[in-house]
Amino acid sequence: MINKNVMKNKRVGIIGAGPSGLAQIRAFEALKDQGYVMPEIICFEKQENWGGMWNYSWRTGVGKYGEPIHGSMYKYLWSNGPKECLEFSDYSFDEHFKKPISSYPPRPVLFDYIQGRIKKSNAREYIRFDTTVRWVSFDEETQKFSVVLDDLKIDKTYTEELDFLVVASGHFSTPNMPYFKGIENFPGTVMHAHDFRGADQFIDRNVLIIGSSYSAEDIGVQCYKHGSKSVTLSYRSNPIGIDWPEGIKELPLVTHFEDDTAFFKDGTTEKYDAVIMCTGYKHKFPFLPDELRLKTKNNLFPDQLYKGIFFNQLPQLIYLGMQDQYYTFNMFDAQAWVARDFMMDRLELPSEAERRFDMDRWLKKNNELESSIDNVDFQSDYIKDLLALSDYPHFSVDKVAEMFKEWLLDKEEDILTYRDKTYQSVVTGTMAAQHHTDWMDELDDSKERYLYAAEEEEFIPERI
């Protein structure tokens, strides 16, 4: 017989109230609906609102309490993958918006969707906003975590003792900022993508973007869309390889700068007004001691984490969303459901040696990946592995994988129009609506414009 009171008097700490942290809260609430007695759940969020990276802030550098800014979101950011690939299994876009919407919504619309699910619950009562984690230690004798916290609003430091700790603080907030000889004398703007807040300041300017990641691709296209004079993307090893429109091009890596002139490996030299480093992020956990800290580069299966979740030397320490990501919201959910079942004593983990064997098997597969298609298949298999371990509402992973592969082809076909494509929900079967404006012509990313502009235009009376 299942003991539904097993977690009575236990305490779970969650660091971060972004999509991963909120997924963990939602996972617990799903069991609460089944009559389980919940542990005490405390979520620590250093921002003043939930949403993590989707919670846009105009600030860069530090926030109003002097803490480093977490978010890297910017104005005019639209989803760069079909929304149907990230849809929550237990909360569809249809349920939230009450009508079909397009497959590539802007940030405010996705943020609204994230909030919709969590607002249906009592999640907010678990979250301490404007609260940052300063230090974590683990007592082997008591088997408890001690977490030192700062309440930023009232400048108070205090400590909480916890049985489980979920690290859901993300890994896209600490910039990797390389140095190039002479860049200190560059007379124009130099920034990392973390501090990019929109393309407005780059209108009629020649922009150099260093990097070949998705952020380089997206920021480059956004600068082009909003009126930059030219955009150059500088790659370290391989170009993105897209058929770029006139006004965007790729060059090999910069070797050095002389004033406003960049020198490239192929001997090319060009003058620029701005340099944006799209050079990635570091997994950074300054609140964790060395023996508890995840140490990894951005990849699809970080070492040290059993099932990509449990810190192998101490499974009570749980990491969510630490992988490089094709899947996002639904992957965080799948991880959170598995983590919850372990914490609720509904899932027994194998021995440390068996866990190590399983991790090595996944790491071997990860090291053999050669293409983006391989990456999609790998992460799809990982999601299936998680879904087999919990009662998270299943969705067709194979159909989502097909969409990801179509998306990759759509971008190769035309980087400027792929966001105008539509896909079918694997949760409800609804076909996405065509957005009322082509993405390249849509310069307003507000929720109101996105959701209601077409309806307003429909009822404009005819002029006589």
Image (spheres, grey):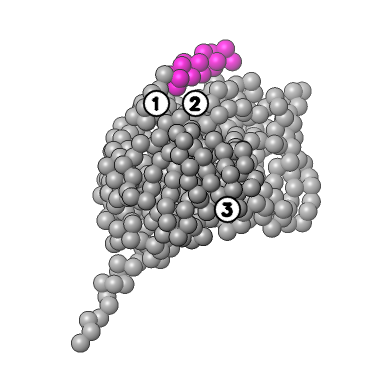
Q: Is residue 185 part of the magenta span, yes or no?
A: no
Image coords of residue 325 (percent x, y): 45, 36
Q: Which residue is mark 1?
A: 378
Q: Residue at x 45, y 60 (%)?
A: 204
Q: Residue at x 45, y 20 (%)?
A: 367
Is any atom of residue 310 visible in this view?
Answer: no
Q: Which residue is mark 2?
A: 301
Image coords of residue 247 (percent x, y): 37, 51
Is any atom of residue 163 visible in this view?
Answer: yes
- By secondary structure, the bulk of the magenta-drawn segment is best described as helix
60 over 376 or under it: above or below = below
CA separation, marks 2 and 3? 35 Å
Q: At numbered mark 1, what does the secondary structure look like: helix, strand or loop?
A: helix
CA separation, marks 3 and 1? 39 Å
145 over 250 or under it: above or below = above
Provide the residue span drawn in magenta.
Answer: 350-367
Quadrant of the rendered image containing residue 25 = top right
Name the disc covering residue 192, or none. none
457 over 425 or under it: above or below = below
